[in-house]
Image (cartoon, rainbow, N blue to C red):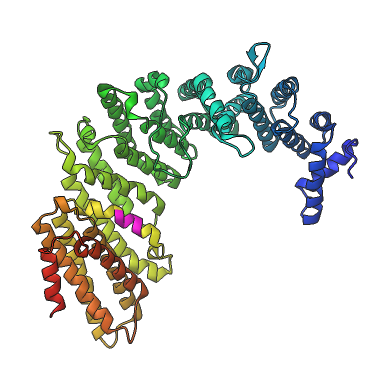
């Protein structure tokens, strides 16, 4: 049994808990920590550690133990004690702004925890824990270090209240979150924007200074946490990007009707270093996703116009997009343009023709650099997939120009994948074809994009397929062909078979014409002829990836042209039969 009456003993415990590399010693220290947390004098000893502890680990242990004390559901601390702890923590942080970062973070987490769990507790007919903005005011009026602490307190509190925990009922969490949303969140968001506006107008702001850089980062995190709040309690998976509507309360309308809010974040993006601008873009992604019903039609059109102007400005000055984090967030922002607005609304924006040209050029360049930030391509393809799918339904008289740009996007995707084959084989790089889930996701998106202006897609695929198939056949017939050359052509054909299967799978029966079915027949015949060639070689050699591509193709072909609902008079069936009977 540990002697918790000795401060020296607690110091030893801290050292063993956080510094030792010996597993058994650390486990003993962890066991002792549990005993310490449950001991009657834990509260007073934690204060003693904070006041007199000789190391940062002593302070961390005290903050951790206090968090456990205020979080326990059995035998909870009285309200007066929790208020005293809250006040003590605030005073401690105010008088010691240069604590170790992990100690400051642990104490701020403690403050946030006390505030959340005591949200509905009253003291003398007053809610004891609802004065967060007042609590941090003194921090914001002091040094840069104090400002960082104050902003981080609000940011951590917002994050803490937004997250459910397993130790308390979900219904209680939702009641607290809803009350916080209605009483405090907008004021916190407004405060963050006002402070960011002050930063924007400070001409001598030195972002090379660690403190000033840290303050701006915490302000952006605070704004993002506010915008990322689960306003209606529906988000179950934060990693999902499908729930891309931000359910801003009606009481927030003024902030979004005022174009200066949107302009603030675009201005910040262009004036701060790439290490911080991804946070700005994350905020813009959320702002772009504000629910449509927050605006009337005229207000939404005005908001969209400002949003598109901001996107255009970024595309015209793309230097910062060379940073992978900036690039990724910007791709997410582009995707939200179509997931939250209709094509008919986009084409009415004054700068639409120039913006769609810039977006197309950006997409083509991105696809050509297939090795750069591959996970971000999903968002670009998602944008073009949604745009292409909207073409039959757009009623606006303004031209959408997609007949010009979707073929360019399709061509860039197809040719870049083919060109990657030789480089991957030559340099021994990781093959994207090994990630079948990612490939299938991209092909699903391409299937819609490629069916827009389908005659151009088909002509390109026929040309590329015939070139690769002829080269492949010649290599097989030659006695001095290298294994590398054969592997390159097999890799190119693998991509082409996958892509042909995808665009055939993208056929929409009600919108398809005899001419498009004829084009499908041209592609199907080529794949079947290739299959005859590869089957004849199976005894000598086979290519597993090409065979998997064939299976994917046949799955799409079966779904579109062999199923029970397919018309028996389909021209493709007759062409296929004629090929098979040869």
- Looking at this rendering, what residue extends furthest in the bottom direction? 479
Is residue 34 depicted above or below 313 in this figure? below
Q: Which of the 4 image quarters holds residue 210?
A: top right
- 327 with respect to 5 (left or right): left
Taking the spot 31% from the left edge, 69% from the top edge, the residue there is 551
Give whichever of 509, 242 is nearer the camera. 509
Q: Position of residue 580 (x, y in %)?
A: 16, 77
Q: Residue at 19% across / 76% down in the picture?
A: 529
Residue nearest the observer in this picture, 11 or 159: 159
Q: Position of residue 465 (x, y in %)?
A: 21, 68
Q: Residue at x 82, y 39 (%)?
A: 36
* 292 on left or right of 180: left
Is residue 102 a member of the stretch shown in magenta? no
- Res. 582 image quadrant: bottom left
Q: Which residues are magenta?
A: 440-444
Q: Position of residue 428 (x, y in %)?
A: 43, 69
413, above or below 9, in the image:
below
């Amino acid at each position: 049994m540990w002697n918790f009456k000795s401060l020296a003993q607690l110091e030893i415990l801290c050292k063993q808990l956080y510094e030792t590399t010996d597993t058994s010693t650390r486990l003993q220290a962890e066991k002792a920590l549990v005993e310490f947390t449950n001991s009657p004098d834990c509260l007073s000893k934690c204060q003693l550690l904070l006041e007199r502890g000789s190391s940062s680990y002593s302070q961390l242990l005290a903050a951790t133990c206090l968090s456990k004390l205020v979080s326990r559901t059995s035998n909870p601390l009285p309200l007066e004690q929790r208020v005293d702890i809250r006040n003590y923590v605030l005073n401690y942080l105010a008088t010691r702004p240069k604590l170790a970062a992990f100690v400051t973070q642990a104490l701020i987490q403690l403050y946030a925890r006390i505030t959340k769990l005591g949200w509905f507790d009253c003291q003398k007919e007053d809610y004891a824990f609802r004065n967060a903005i007042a609590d941090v005011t003194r921090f914001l009026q002091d040094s840069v270090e104090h400002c960082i602490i104050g902003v981080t307190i609000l940011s951590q509190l917002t994050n803490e209240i937004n997250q459910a925990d397993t130790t308390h009922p979900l219904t209680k969490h939702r009641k607290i979150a809803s009350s916080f949303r209605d009483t405090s969140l907008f004021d916190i968001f407004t405060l963050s924007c006002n402070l960011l506006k002050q930063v924007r107008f400070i001409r001598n702001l030195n972002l090379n200074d660690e403190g000033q850089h840290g303050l701006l980062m915490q302000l952006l995190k605070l704004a993002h946490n506010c915008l990322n709040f689960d306003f209606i309690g529906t988000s179950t998976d934060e990693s999902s990007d499908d729930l891309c509507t931000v359910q801003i309360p009606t009481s927030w309308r003024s902030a979004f009707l005022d174009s200066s809010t949107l302009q603030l974040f675009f201005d910040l993006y262009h004036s701060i270093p790439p290490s911080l601008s991804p946070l700005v873009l994350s905020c813009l992604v959320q702002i772009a996703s504000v629910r449509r019903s927050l605006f009337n039609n005229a207000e939404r059109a005005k908001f969209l116009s400002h949003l598109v102007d901001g996107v255009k400005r970024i595309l015209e000055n793309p230097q910062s997009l060379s940073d992978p984090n900036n690039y990724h967030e910007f791709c997410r922002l582009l995707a939200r343009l179509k997931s939250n607005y209709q094509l008919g609304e986009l084409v009415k924006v004054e700068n639409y023709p120039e913006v769609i040209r810039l977006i197309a050029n950006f997409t083509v360049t991105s696809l050509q650099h297939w090795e750069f930030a591959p996970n971000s391509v999903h968002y670009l393809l998602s944008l073009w997939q949604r745009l292409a799918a909207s073409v039959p339904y757009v009623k606006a008289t303004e031209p959408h120009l997609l007949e010009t740009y979707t073929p360019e996007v399709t061509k860039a995707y197809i040719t870049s994948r083919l060109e990657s084959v030789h480089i991957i084989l030559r340099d021994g790089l990781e093959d994207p074809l090994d990630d079948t889930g990612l490939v299938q996701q991209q092909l699903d998106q391409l299937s819609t994009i490629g069916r827009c202006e389908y005659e151009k897609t088909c002509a390109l695929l026929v040309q590329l397929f015939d070139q690769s198939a002829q080269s492949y056949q010649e290599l097989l017939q030659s006695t001095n062909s290298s294994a590398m050359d054969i592997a390159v052509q097999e890799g190119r054909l693998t991509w082409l078979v996958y892509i042909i299967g995808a665009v055939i799978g993208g056929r929409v029966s009600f919108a398809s014409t005899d001419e498009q079915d004829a084009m499908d027949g041209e592609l199907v015949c080529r794949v079947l002829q290739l299959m005859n060639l590869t089957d004849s070689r199976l005894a000598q050699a086979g290519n597993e990836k090409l065979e998997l591509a064939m299976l994917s193709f046949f799955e799409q072909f079966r779904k579109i042209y062999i199923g029970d609902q397919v018309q028996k008079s389909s021209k493709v069936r007759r062409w296929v039969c004629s090929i098979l009977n040869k």
